[in-house]
Image (spheres, rainbow, N blue to C red):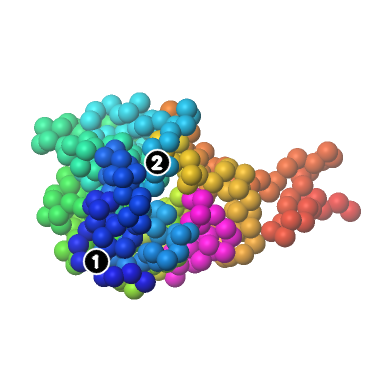
Amino acid sequence: MNKAVSTTLRTPRQLVSNGLAPAATLPDLEKVAARYAVALTPEVAALIDPADPADPIARQYLPDARELDSLPVENADPIGDHARSPVEGIVHRYPDRVLFKPVHVCAVYCRFCFRREMVGPNGDSALTPEVYAAALGYIRLHPEIWEVILTGGDPLMLSPRRLKEVMADLAAIDHVKIIRVHSRVPMADPARVTPEMVAALRVPGASTWVAVHANHAREFSEAARAACARIVDAGIPMVSQSVLLAGVNDTAPALEALMRAFVECRIKPYYLHHGDLAPGTAHLRATLDEGRQLMRELRGRVSGLCQPAFVLDIPGGFGKAPVGPDYLAPDSEAGYRVTDFCGGVHAYPPRP
């Protein structure tokens, strides 16, 4: 498809020299890269078909001049992380769980990222030992915290040694029972998922879950599938998260293939996110109505194992709301109207 890449590509000039972007776009892409981080691993670069202007992998990772066009409704912190951050490194939005962000770099940088202003070389800095200790202290002082979600950045960018330390520190807190790790690494840089990395994920005192992010079935390379298998074979359950993206997965066949790929890898589809109002991402956002219709079509096409929850993060830090289609409505008489997967409407309970 394109010439082999041996190192992560981090500049528009490298994208052009490797045939992934036209030379004429270089000035615009350099303006984008000056504001938002760029990184494509060799594994991701190998998936891109430069001859296809609508390539769904390229659309996720290659910078686009439209990223410099922000709408009034867009926000540098679209889901309100800062508003719900009691101490640096922690987001406490729901009573029983917190986000813990020990790292702010990623293997790759998605063009639709809702934390695009916070991650990358020019983003937030790594937690100092003092800030890290304060974040752990906050978790210790709040016995209602049952689950800690490691995010960032991508926590699997930590070394196995450092990841093991973080996991052990969290598991040592008596009321923390679940540690969930959110990562793109198994798909974007599967070689990082070494036996040492997998061993670091397992820790006495807490149960580990891994949420892996993918948006198109083509991301499931042989190496990515093997990386996920190493995690699952170690007894670590996996769930998925995806973003509904215009031109990437906004058709029923594309979503069907993506969700089936997850399940074939023993990954339970968990969340399909409506695109957040991050700056410069309007060209990648499908509409809520399109998402609801796609979820209705998915219900009729694939097994219940393949059904994610379609969710919207309410701007301002108010959490996720399920926004999928409705199948149940009150009837004008006693009872309800229920819509089946083919669109037929039925009375419940059935009328004599």
Secondary structure, mark 1, is loop
Question: How far separated are the C-alphas under marks 2 and 1?
Answer: 25 Å
Q: Name the residue under label 2.
A: 67
Q: In the picture, residue 121 is in which quadrant? A: top left
- Look at the picture and state if 146 lies above or below 213: above
- Camera sees residue 65: yes
Let me know if residue 145 is in the magenta part: no
Question: Which amino acid does the dot numbered 2 rest on?
Answer: Glu
- Camera sees residue 214: no
- Residue at 57% x, 58% y: name it: 251
Q: Residue furthest right?
A: 352
Q: Position of residue 196 (x, y in %)?
A: 16, 64
Magenta-colored span? 244-264
Tell me which label, 2 or 1, sits earlier in the chain. 1
Q: Where is residue 155 in the image (x, y as percent from the top left)?
A: 24, 49
From the image, give the main secondary structure of the stretch colored magenta: helix
> Dot 1, how many residues are within 10 Å of its Cα: few (below 14), some (14-19), or many (20+)?
some
The one of 239 and 142 positioned closer to us in this rendering:
239
Q: In the picture, residue 220 is in which quadrant? A: bottom left
Q: Name the residue under label 1.
A: 5
Question: Which amino acid does the dot numbered 1 rest on?
Answer: Val
- Look at the picture and state if 318 lies above or below 177: above
Secondary structure, mark 2, is helix
Q: In which quarter of the image is the N terminus?
A: bottom left
- Residue at 54% x, 54% y: name it: 250
Asked if disc 2 and disc 1 are in contact, CB closer than 8 Å, the reply is no
- Residue at 43% x, 36% y: name it: 69
